[in-house]
Image (cartoon, rainbow, N blue to C red):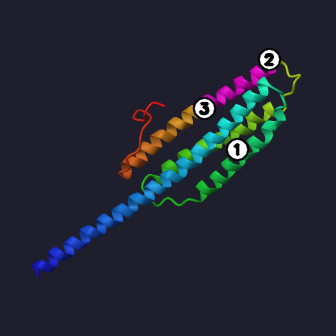
Amino acid sequence: MRKIFIFLSFVLVQTIAFAQTDYNKQAWELYIKLESMTVQLHEKGTVWTEKFNELYKINKNYNELSPLRQDIEHLIDSGLIEMNKMKDKIPGSNNLRVAYIKLFNLEKTMVVKAYVPFEHLSNYSAPETISNYYKYLSIYDKKEDEELHNVDIAKMQYAKKNKLKLETPDTQPNK
């Protein structure tokens, strides 16, 4: 009887360990999914910024920004749809998901209110107009930094709850 008990205890421990590993895998996969959406968004925003700088220096045909902005909007919209459909089955996933949703909602507002005006600029636009648009965009950049900070906090809480090892902004190597 004692051997059976020891054997069953061993099987139970192994089952729990396997389930925990699978559980951590699910937690990790959710994190990667949300983070990859954010990385894609950052990459597309960088392309928009580089194109703006190119247009500013060369031909001032700012309507070329429109397809890039629309691509960003599509990514944001599809990301929001996907995040809102996600089920919160993992500890801390709701807080993490909501932090990313808030970030994406801000990005959507920023794209609509701060990117679109640049598309209406022309060769004849006054430098003050461009400067004012840029100042308005800078306001959203500050709000974006705040939301990114909130996402970082949610990521660290999520990682702690799910025993994931993530690099924090303080531990990332200098780039």
Is the stretch drawn in magenta largely helix, strand or loop? helix
Q: Residues within 10 Å of mark 3 (few under 14, many from 20)?
A: some
Disc 3 designates what residue? 143
Magenta residues, start to end = 129-142
Which secondary structure, mark 1? Answer: helix
Q: Residue at x 24, y 67 (%)?
A: 13
Image depth: mark 3 or mark 2 in front:
2
Label 3 – label 2 distance at C-alpha? 23 Å
Q: CA distance from mark 2 to mark 1?
A: 26 Å
Instruction: Single out the residue that lies furthest toward the left.
Output: 2
Q: Which residue is mark 1?
A: 72
Residue 132: say if magenta. yes
Quick check: 133 above or below 10? above
Label 2 Cα crowd, 10 Å radius (few <14 / some 14-19 / many 20+): few
In this figure, which residue is indicated by the disc labeled 2?
Answer: 128
The image quadrant where one finds the N terminus is bottom left
Return the x and y of residue 157 as percentages of the image width and height: 41, 45
